[in-house]
Amino acid sequence: MDINEFITHFAEQFEETELSEFKPETKFKELDEYCSLIALKLIAMVDEEYDITIKGNDIRNSNTIEDLFNIVKNKE
Amino acid sequence: MYNPYSLEGKTILITGASSGIGRATAIECSKLGARCIITARNQERLQQTLNQLEGDGHIQIFADLTKKDELENLINQTPKIDGLVNSAGIVYSKPITFIKQDDLDKIFSINTYAPIILTKSLIKQKKINKRGSIVIISSIASDTQTPGNTIYGMAKSALACFTRYCALELAQNKIRVNSIHPGMINTEMTANICISKEEIEIDKNTYPLKRYGEPQEIAWAIIYLLSDASSFVTGSKLTIDGGKSLI
Ligand SMILES: NC(=O)c1ccc[n+]([C@@H]2O[C@H](COP(=O)([O-])OP(=O)(O)OC[C@H]3O[C@@H](n4cnc5c(N)ncnc54)[C@H](OP(=O)(O)O)[C@@H]3O)[C@@H](O)[C@H]2O)c1
């Protein structure tokens, strides 16, 4: 699994946020656009792109994009 | 003792009885004198419900309501009943852009098709006694929207619609059919759906009564609809949501 590819998919769930804002160390919950619907989209994206099931808990336990990436990677 | 809500002498079939609202309903029904037929898939959890029932003669039947043979077996094993509570269901969130045909099939199978086929089959086999009562657990999601809840909301709307048609057609059999529309209730179902504890607290605050409901608070309404106290009530929709749909 590649983090850059993950970030691309991650960013696709947002409509307003500049692409340059999405970095491994980005604290995504602090992005203005972040909301519960985006959390749901992230869960669905991981399922669709990686065939991996993550839960609300996994989002809850991640601060940065890289945290979430690592959770997904560990479930591979 | 005078009690128009008594279920003494009634046999009630309750689906989804291994957890949450279904379990609380079975326990409360037994306390009011009903004989309960309880059903679900998980043997351990259904047994735990059975252990908590008061009185004798209760039966448990394991069935996955989405599997044709298991549903048929349940229908065949069910004795004559006076009440049916359709509580089995699952919650599922999927933003619209990610919805697949499989998601639709999965949710509609258990939340909509299973209660329709179960209800229909029991009527057709004349297993529901005259003056019987059918209670369908829909949700406030049938008429209010929260992001990601599309399929669940549609499935619950379909069920609410089924309730009204069923009430009309089954009036001929003197069987009443009503739906209950709960807001958030503290059960297994709600334990894992919100994103964070803070969000749950914020959400609770959107309820005029500033909390989520308890399974017994739904069970008591179900009991009203099962009992002779509601003998003139059919085709109605009872919202139980701490005032959530007012705002
Ligand atoms: N909790 C809420 O906030 C809320 C709000 C509005 C409406 N509702 C509705 O109320 C009903 C009960 O919900 P709950 O909160 O009590 O949920 P719950 O605690 O998760 O219980 C759901 C029950 O459904 C059964 N079930 C699920 N899939 C099944 C299948 N394929 N075959 C047979 N049984 C199945 C489960 O048993 P097994 O796993 O053992 O099979 C369990 O007993 C549902 O229809 C739900 O949509 C709940």
Image (cartoon, rainbow, N blue to C red):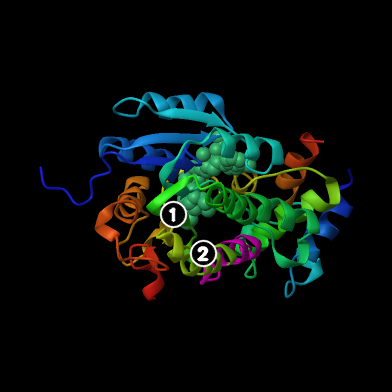
Q: Are marks 2 and 1 on the same chain?
A: yes
Q: Tag 2, which secondary structure?
A: helix
Measured Cα–Cα span from mark 2 to mark 1: 9 Å
In the rendering, at what x and y percent does residue A12 appear?
80, 65
Q: Which residue is drawn at the image coordinates 41% and 56% (left, top)? A: B201
Q: Which residues are magenta?
A: B142-157
What residue is disc 2 on? Answer: B166
In the rendering, at what x and y percent does residue A58 appear?
64, 44
Q: Nearer the viewer, residue A36 or B54?
A: B54
What residue is disc 1 on? Answer: B134
**Residue B73 appears in the figure:** yes
The three-letter code of the residue at mark 1 reads Ile
Q: Contact, CB < 8 Å: mark 2 with mark 1?
A: yes
Query: Left or right: B190 with respect to B237?
Result: right
Q: Say which label, 2 or 1, has the lower sequence index.
A: 1
The three-letter code of the residue at mark 2 reads Cys
Q: Which residue is drawn at the image coordinates 32% and 25% (left, top)? A: B56
